Amino acid sequence: MSEPVTLCVITLNEEDRLADCLRSASFADHTVVVDSCSTDRTREIAEEFGAEVVVRQFGGRLVEQKDHAVGLAKTDWVLCLDCDERLTPELVRSVRDALAGPGDTVAFSMNRRTFYLGRFIDHGGWYPDRKVRLFRRDKARWGGVNPHDHVVVESGPVGHLEGDIHHYSYRSVSDHLRQIDNFTTTSAQAWVERGRKFSFFKLVFNPVGKFFRMYVLKAGFLDGAAGFCVAALGATYVFLKYLKHWELTRRNRD
């Protein structure tokens, strides 16, 4: 007999992407959507798919929002997806097989493949981008330093599933740049809160190293023009993170 599973999703104004996400995991026995006060049709769409919708003000930490969704699950097993993610048919079969007989395994990882600039990105460190998304909620939890959350497995073996999560992360380059701006601000603030010292050396050289690793060492050039853009924006992310850290450090000192 297969283990029942709850699909957990957090949302904020995702009316254009939520339906495809929920449809890809329609096999779930229970669906929980924790919404951060959307102003579009997000909650209505979730209810159309039979989801339990809970409105909760976003407090600035993705980890807390995702853990809250997991806490509302009615099953031992949970599957956590973001609104911009979809399970491929192969991965759906793998999830079903895993839940049919998980044995001692308490969590399963899966590969994530991102669609960007008209193609899936297979190099540059963007793939396979392995993520733990299926787990027993008494054996694992969401953790990490904001905004880079991940599942922390506290005890027990972790398996791996065949198939991919298809990730439609950015609606446009402008959307990507907005996320870079938001995430680098959050990362810099986290560094300041933890007392990390600013390094001018890293501000200058880490972005260059990031581009070289992504484009050359991790073969981003094999993804063509898109691979170059991915590496360039990766370097931009690193540069802005250190630049904002410098700005916040100077502001606090003054």
Image (tube, grey):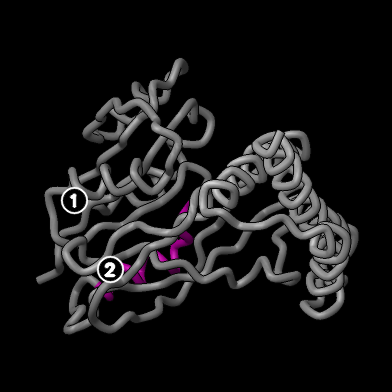
Residue 44: name its quadrant. top left
**Residue at the top extreme?**
39
Q: Up-down: is 6 above or below 186?
A: below
Q: Is residue 110 left or right of residue 190?
A: left
The secondary structure type at the circle numbered 1 is loop
Numbered range of the magenta stretch: 85-98
Q: Which residue is mark 2?
A: 96
Residue 70 placement (x, y as % from top left): 24, 49
Q: Residue at x 21, y 78 (%)?
A: 102
Is residue 95 on the magenta stretch?
A: yes
Residue situated in front as seen by the camera: 207 or 14: 207
Is residue 122 on the magenta stretch?
A: no
Q: Residue at x 25, y 57 (%)?
A: 78
Residue situated in front as seen by the camera: 48 or 34: 34
Q: Which residue is mark 1?
A: 29
Q: Is residue 90 left or right of residue 48?
A: right
